[in-house]
């Protein structure tokens, strides 16, 4: 499918690239171009769309991409969740998260820097993974 994208539209947005895609070239032996197009639209519903068409195709072909890192306050909540639940037994999940976010905002900057450093290194790992896979 990647080879059937015209060179002039390779780096344009996915929607523009999709309009120029020749489904006759993409179609497999036992599938019609219409069936291939319909299946591709079904796959696209599950993908991020702020990419070029070529990047979307690469994502669709690779299902082994790592998850995006959690935000600093989400990491803080994950580490302290048991403690928050123990101290506030009658509070449901979203309210508990709201309470944890308020506590996170009051943390000293040096603690927040540690969490942000963790996110920074995780995002570097993701970038390296995407470059080499």
Image (cartoon, rainbow, N blue to C red):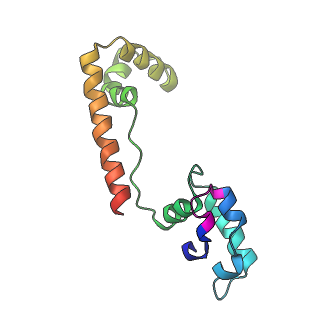
Q: Residue at x 32, y 36 (%)?
A: 119
Percent coordinates x, y for residue 47 in the rendering:
57, 55
**Closer to the camera in the image, 105 or 8:** 8
Decide if residue 41 is in sight here.
no
* Position above or below: 98 against 119: above
Q: Is residue 50 left or right of residue 20?
A: left
The quadrant holding residue 40 is: bottom right
Query: Is residue 13 visible in this depiction of the protein?
Result: yes
Residue in the picture at 41% in, 57% down:
65
**In the image, is residue 40 above or below residue 94?**
below
Asked which quadrant contains residue 32, the reply is bottom right
**Number of numbered discs:** 0
Q: Position of residue 16 (x, y in %)?
A: 69, 58
Give the farthest residue toward the bottom.
29
Give percent across and percent down for residue 106: 35, 11
Question: Magenta stretch: residue 11 in it?
Answer: yes
Range of the magenta residues?
Answer: 8-14
Q: Nearer the viewer, residue 34 or 1?
A: 1
Whether residue 97 is situated above or below residue 6 in the rendered picture: above
Left or right of 74 on screen, residue 8? right
Quadrant showing the N terminus: bottom right
């Amino acid at each position: 499918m990647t080879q059937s994208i015209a060179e002039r539209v390779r780096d344009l947005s996915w929607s523009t690239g999709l309009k120029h895609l020749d489904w006759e070239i993409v179609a497999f032996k036992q599938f019609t171009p219409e069936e291939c197009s319909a299946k591709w639209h079904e796959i696209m519903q599950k993908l991020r769309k702020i990419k070029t068409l070529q990047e979307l195709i690469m994502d669709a072909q690779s299902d082994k991409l790592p998850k995006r890192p959690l935000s600093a306050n989400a990491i803080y909540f994950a580490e302290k969740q048991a403690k928050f639940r123990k101290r506030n037994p009658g509070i449901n999940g979203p309210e508990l998260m709201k309470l944890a976010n308020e506590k996170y905002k009051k943390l000293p900057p040096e603690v927040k820097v540690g969490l942000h450093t963790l996110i920074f290194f995780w995002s570097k790992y993701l970038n390296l993974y995407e470059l080499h896979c």
